[in-house]
Image: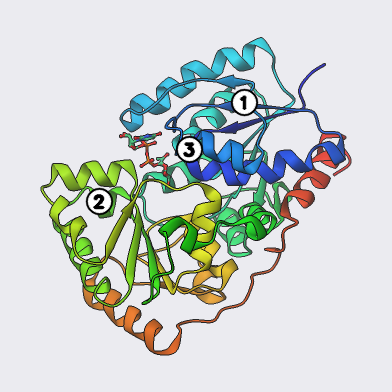
Amino acid sequence: MMTEVLCVVGARPNFMKIAPIMAAFPAQAISTKLVHTGQHYDPAMSDSFFDQLGIPRPDVNLEVGSASHAVQTADIMRAFEPVLDAQPPRAILVVGDVNSTIACALVAAKKGIPVIHVEAGLRSNDRAMPEEINRVLTDQISDLLYTTERSALANLLREGIARERIQFVGNVMIDTLRAHLARAVPAEATLGGKPARGHAVVTLHRPSNVDDPATLRRLLETLGVVAREVDVVFPIHPRTRSAAERLGLAGLLAAPGIRLLPPQGYLEMLGLMRDATLVLTDSGGLQEETTALGVPCITLRENTERPITLVEGTNTLTGPNPDAILACFRDILASGGKRGRIPEFWDGHAAERIAAHLRAWLDGTA
Ligand code: UD1
């Protein structure tokens, strides 16, 4: 029987998005298969999420691994085409904005296979960000675009996407958060005791922050200042660790109060964030997760593609600017920071809305 929706994942932030979508398909009798491109391959960056989130084992793993953007994207395309040729599905579904997202969308679109994009329409308006290119291009070639926040609609209309292709369904990553919060590993279990001073969770991996020596130095020095007042818990991304070593900045990671951890599992990370005094990050996902958890977030970027986290949530943008970061940090310590509220449709049911709409779309009744 023909697969109706072939789902694609590749990198860590894709896994928590695909889990609730695939879990919602059986209730709508949507037949599905899963392709993993292998963009992320370390057990801590990939397998652990399949285990903890109950994602089905991929039917196909393209095993592309790491390379430059061009080579990685091209490798994914070359490996994905024969998968579609062997068993063309009715449609493919891609999530987020990583290289796997655009690579597989492009292969399918050229074959006339409809592309469904979940988390469409987010825009940082910063083309220096590789993900922004992936977002704009994926949305242009998608047939059905599911959005997480209302700002996405105006972005898509401005780019000429037809209104009837766009559906506001809410945030599937927050479905996963709500489904697993009760099972989150408490921070004190991960840290071997509760930090008496409280803790900040830090993640850092954007090229704009970690590949430039002066920026990375400023950021790591600022974390050293934060660590004078709260424990800084830093699950370090492989590219950040290698950048710090290559640029001779590894000493700053050993400052008193900074606790480096390897990449964490989903349930461990959820517990670390839930129990934190604050989060400092350049991740897209953490901006949304902290808003859902009501934990203050300092985003170490000049812009965000997720403006609802600023307007309704707990997020503040500081860029990589030490004075702005420390001013915001002191404000959070003094007053608890932004309280925020839960955005519309971040209610744990986004994937069910997608599956219900998709059923009708596949049946030609949407
Ligand atoms: C990718 C995504 C980014 C996402 C991030 C989450 C793109 C353009 N970027 O960035 O949007 O926020 O994932 O992590 O798709 N590496 C390992 N083990 C792995 C995977 C990667 O050690 O399992 C190392 C390799 O040295 C690799 C580097 O990390 O070169 C970067 O990996 P890559 O997938 O190219 O980009 P990320 O920075 O992870």
Within 10 Å of disc 1 (Cα), the crowding (few <14, some 14-19, many 20+) is: some
Task: Name the residue furthest left.
Answer: 248
Residue 123 appears in view: no
Image disc number at residue 58? 1
Quote the CA–CA distance across marks 2 and 1: 31 Å
Image disc number at residue 210? 2
Within 10 Å of disc 3 (Cα), the crowding (few <14, some 14-19, many 20+) is: many
Quarter of the image for the N terminus: give it.
Answer: top right
Residue 198 percent location from the top left of the image: 40, 74
Q: Secondary structure at mark 3?
A: loop
Q: State the residue at coordinates (32%, 74%).
A: 230
Quote the CA–CA distance across marks 2 and 3: 19 Å
Task: Name the residue furthest front.
Answer: 193
Quote the CA–CA distance across marks 1 and 3: 13 Å
Q: State the residue at coordinates (59%, 50%).
A: 119
Q: Report the side of 234 relative to 95 (left or right).
A: left
355 versus 103 height, above or below: below
Q: Earlier in the sequence, mark 1 or mark 3?
A: 3
Q: Secondary structure at mark 2?
A: helix
Q: State the residue at coordinates (87%, 34%).
A: 363
Q: Answer with the quarter of the image where residue 333 lies.
A: bottom left
Quarter of the image for the C terminus: give it.
Answer: top right
Q: Amino acid at mark 3?
A: Ala
- Between marks 2 and 1 in the image, the one whose residue lies nearer the viewer: 1
Image disc number at residue 11? 3
**Between 280 and 77, which is closer to the camera in this rendering?**
280
290 versus 267 height, above or below: below
Q: Secondary structure at mark 1?
A: loop
Q: Ligand 1: which quarter? A: top left
Q: Amino acid at mark 1?
A: Pro
